[in-house]
């Protein structure tokens, strides 16, 4: 299995990614829907490979994924998927109708601006805490010193030394409840989040839908959102979904 | 001057906006660059008009701006500007080259994901605190009850009752310093943020560039970022910039 330290494969599309990263999952799903062959390279996040000079030369944010297209790096999963649409317009994943396309972008935007952060606050204590809390002060300082994005540095500090409080966790659950209500309202048109066609909106939200079960302990159940539940069944039934390997997130 | 309560004007493009809102400024700048005539309707934020049932029917997030195109509401400034590009492709503000277009979206994304929040934490205490801290508990409860987005509710609670701490303000300044460094690096190619052509990236960042002076008390000066300083002079020299009325933000 190639790693970030191997020579760059001689292929049109190379994806630097991690299995459990929601942003990586979005791009894998998009590539599979479009039937685009690619070479995947694992970035071992727990070994901090995303913050090595080699990787930072490709992606100055020090996060996965990064797509190389003919050797040229493209970053940010939402931007990568729009780029794939621009460069490979066959099997379109953007609606042709401009107002459905805007609805698609409102959802890709919701995933980026609201949903990612809420899931981090909801469960990073459990997902990352067991590892991060054991770091020595030197290890934490090293982690922070090699992390380029200040917001990300603060997230590491929080999970290692000042875990998210019960108040913050409850607020994150509220945010995700609001998102579920908005999905349910959007899907009144349906059958897909942007309207009549499967799009990057459905792709962007699917790595979070796989985690909706984490809301049950906060009293929210997918069965109470029947349109969203039916949408999620339709997403999971797509052959590309299985190929993209968007599996339940494991806790430490 | 029309307000949110007047009947909808019979025109192709109507913009619900506020002068000082950075997101409104982005859309005004885009409309002016493209030479698209529109009717502007002020939403009086301090009167909470953005959270009235009439406005929420157009924009369920309860924020400005909202564009009506032939009566159909389009929300989120970045999405609105991409929509305007999709519907009115003349005078393009997206680079034709796919990799420059990706660079453009990395910057519109940076403005949305990183810069807005950092400027809020940097100076909302001063901008909103004098008004919000005087709200009675009932007024605050009413404000929160009528605000649809949970993150925004929390921002109101913070500024009214638990102002951002000096630590948070310093971290916000660090984030903005990082953004300045990234701009300076991006502009090595230049002359525009996405590369060879003026684009939605420059438009999205301009309402924050007008505020870079707020970083001086944190020891950061635009003159130390000469490429960014020259870029900002180029942006301000555009005739559409003056028409969009992107003036310095006033403090209470």
Image (spheres, coloured by chain):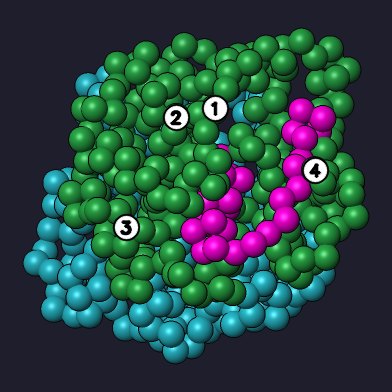
Chain colours: A cyan, B green
- Image quadrant assignment for residue B104: bottom left
On the image, the x and y values in percent for residue B55 come to 83, 48
- Image quadrant assignment for residue B99: bottom left
Q: Is residue A232 shown above or below A90?
A: above
SS class of the residue under badge 2?
A: loop
Q: Is residue A89 shown above or below A62?
A: below
How many C-alpha atoms fall within 10 Å of the one at disc 1: few (<14), some, or many (≥20)?
some
**Disc 2 to disc 4, how far (Cα)?**
28 Å
Share a chain, discs 1 and 3? yes
Based on the picture, tell me whether residue B26 belongs to the magenta stretch: yes
Task: Return the chain for callout 2.
Answer: B
Q: Report the number of numbered marks.
A: 4
Q: Are marks 2 and 1 in contact (CB under 8 Å)?
A: yes
Q: Which residues are magenta?
A: B22-48
Q: Which comes before the other along the chain, label 2 or label 1?
A: 2
Q: Which comes before the other along the chain, label 3 or label 2?
A: 3
């Amino acid at each position: 299995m190639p790693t970030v330290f191997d020579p760059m494969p001689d292929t049109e599309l190379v994806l630097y990614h991690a299995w459990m990263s929601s942003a990586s999952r979005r791009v894998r799903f998009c590539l599979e829907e479009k039937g685009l062959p690619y070479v995947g390279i694992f970035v071992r996040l727990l070994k901090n490979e995303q913050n090595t000079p080699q990787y930072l030369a490709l992606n100055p944010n020090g996060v996965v994924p990064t797509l190389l297209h003919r050797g040229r790096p493209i970053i940010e999963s939402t931007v990568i998927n729009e780029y794939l649409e621009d460069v490979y317009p066959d099997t379109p994943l953007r609606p042709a109708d401009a107002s459905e396309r805007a609805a698609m972008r409102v959802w890709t935007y919701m995933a980026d601006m609201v949903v990612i952060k809420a899931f981090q606050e909801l469960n990073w204590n459990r997902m990352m805490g067991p590892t991060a809390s054991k770091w020595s002060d030197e290890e934490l300082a090293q982690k922070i010193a090699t992390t380029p994005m200040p917001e990300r540095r603060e997230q590491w500090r929080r999970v290692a030394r000042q875990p998210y409080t019960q108040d913050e966790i409850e607020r994150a659950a509220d945010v995700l409840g609001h998102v579920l209500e908005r999905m349910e309202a959007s899907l009144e048109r349906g059958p897909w989040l942007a309207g009549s066609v499967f799009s990057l909106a459905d792709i962007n939200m699917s790595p979070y839908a796989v985690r909706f079960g984490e809301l049950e302990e906060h009293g929210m159940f997918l069965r109470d959102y029947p349109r969203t539940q039916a949408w999620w069944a339709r997403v999971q039934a797509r052959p590309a979904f299985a190929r993209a390997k968007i599996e339940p997130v494991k806790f430490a």
